[in-house]
Structures are given as C-alpha cells and as structure tokens.
Amino acid sequence: MSQQKLTIAERLARPELLTLQPYESARRIGGEGQIWINANESPFNNSDVDNLNRYPECQPPALINAYAQYAQVRSEQVITSRGADEAIELLIRTFCVPGKDSIACFGPTYGMYAISAQTFNVGVNALRLNDEYQLPNDIAEQVSDAKLVFICNPNNPTGTVISPQVIAQVIAKLPDALVVVDEAYIEFCPDYSVANLIDQFDNLVVLRTLSKAFALAGARCGFMLANEMIIEMVMRVIAPYPVPLPVSNLACEALSLQGIDTMKQQVSQLKQNGSRLSEALLRIGASVLPANGNFVLATFSDVTDIRHKLKQGGVVARAYKDPALANSIRFSFASDEQTDTLIKLLVD
C-alpha cells in the first residue's frame, strides 16, 4: 500500500503493528448465555461489588460513553487507561520504534514524557519553553523528526497556558507527527481545551485524567481522545483488562451530572484558595506565575529559608532539580483550613 493511502496512524505506527493480530480476551470476544466458563474465572464472588469475580470489559461502554459525553467527543474517539500515565506509554509503544524513533517535549514540564520514552529506549528531544513559557516560534525545526510531540497545557509545574489558536497552528505545522496535548488540569481553565479540534486534525491526541479536579487520584483513571484510526491502533497494544471494575464504577459516578456539579464546585473553591495563597506569596516577596491549574509556582530570593519554614510547619510542597526551577516551589491548592494554616506559616 502506498504511503499516500495510509492513514496517519498507519504511517506513524510501528510497522509490525500493521499486521499484528491483537490478543482477544474473553470479554472482547463476548458471547451470549447464562453459564460463563470461557475465561477461567472463579464462580465465587467474595466481595460486595457485583461481578468482581469476573474480568471487566477492556473498555467499559458505560465509562467510555460517560466520558465521551463529558468531553463532547464521540465514543469511538475515547480510550480509558490507568491514568494518563498509561496513555503516554501506550502512545510510545504504539508509534515509536525503540532505538530509532524519538519524542519531543518542552521543559520545564511533566517528567514522565521523557522517562516513559527512555524506559522504552526511545529518544528524547528535550526542548525548552521560551522565557514567557510559550512554545518556540521555530517549533517545526526544533522538533525535527520526532514521532510524538508532547505539550502540557496547562503546563506542570509552571501553571502557564498556551492558547488553543497557537496549538492549532503547531498541529498544522507538524503533519508528520502526533501532537499530544496533556490536559490533566483542563477543568481549571476549560476554555483552553483543544478536544474540539480532534475532528479537524488527524494528528491530534488529547490526554485527560480524573486524578485532579475529579479527586480520584487513587483510582488511576485516565483517557486518551483522538481520531478513530489512532484509537484503533492503540487498542492493538493495550492490556486485556486495563480498568478494574471498581475504578470504572467510581469513574462513572464521578461523571454523572451530580458528580460533575460537585467537581465544578470544588474547582471553584480550590481556585479561590489558590488566589488567597498567591496573594500571600506575593506579600512575602515571592515571584508568582499565574495559576491555571490546581497549583501555583513561586520563586524565592531565599528558597532555603522557605523550605526550612515549610518543613518546620509540617508542610510537604514540591521542589525541583531543573536548574531553571532551583529557587522555586510548587504549592498544590488545598482545603480552606489547610490554606489558612499555610498562609499563616508563610506570612508570620
């Protein structure tokens, strides 16, 4: 088949995946009947959770449909995974040939893009955001021949954002790469999402999670949004049962109308506490970046003194090894009471 007739998923995928016959688990094969003995499961359910003795669906329809409705995409454009971290690895496993291909990312940013690539012997083109924490103007030249280009938006740990218009321009400039936009914190600034561009760009992938705004970090439930060809290719390498049944149940509850309403109320409360914390940090002379996620990055003239004060007060915040962040600390937004305590600790 000529390159012109291949979809972008077929052009970029590891060649062996084009002829791979995916593993067909008992659930993916399915069937009809009253006695299910096709999966070597135990007939005994020793739990209060219904059907916990049975393997779950690979992609639970109720969960996929719930998230598709929430994200305003089609269910065929959604994969659920063990957090967005697994989605990162799935993309690398699907599209990058070990020892040959590479990814690109823009620091300072989330470290798992590079680490996941390195663990699969995939190269990392570690680029930098500019002084305003925006993408470089010559991004196409800098990215070179990277298969996957990761953009964290809002960016972790800076909390800065890149406009959807700029991201759309970048996607158009990189027709031979998959542009992966990590929107883990998008509920805190929903106007910056590019999920609505999936039908416009075949080479766009959006990562989402229930770990942040939906308060389900311990459940490990994430999502990949992309065109159907990319979804189908990734499904060739996904584990047989990536989402445990209790996780799926919790996630569906979180994505109900009541769950989404609760999330929005909590996001509003966290943003208010973030504003209070940012103001307190400014009062003590810190340089504070605009907060578009559930955290704020502050830079101090004497970061050692702040670290000592936090330690003495029993506060565990995030410091970084990146030289550009040597004098910075990232503060996650907290409850009203915890925010009061933290502000008192910093200001007094």
Image (cartoon, rainbow, N blue to C red):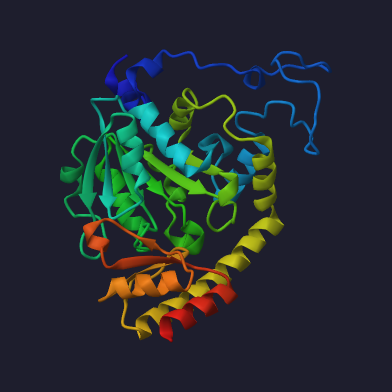
Residue 151 sits above or below residue 188 on the image: above
Q: Which residue corresponds to the image point at 58% horizontal and 71% vertical from the top-left? A: 335
Q: Position of residue 138 (x, y in %)?
A: 16, 50
**Quadrant of the frame with the N terminus:** top left
**Quadrant of the frame with the C terminus:** bottom left
Q: Nearer the viewer, residue 202 or 155?
A: 155
Q: Which residue corresponds to the image point at 27% horizontal and 75% vertical from the top-left? A: 302
In this picture, residue 93 sits left or right of residue 303 = right
Occupied quadrant, residue 295: bottom left
Residue 182 sits above or below residue 230 on the image: below
Specify whether residue 303 is in view.
yes
Residue 216 sits above or below residue 124 on the image: below
Q: Position of residue 30 (x, y in %)?
A: 69, 19
Q: Nearer the viewer, residue 8 or 298?
A: 298
Specify whether residue 226 is in view.
no
Q: Which residue corresponds to the image point at 70% horizontal and 15% vertical from the top-left? A: 40
Q: Nearer the viewer, residue 164 or 2?
A: 164
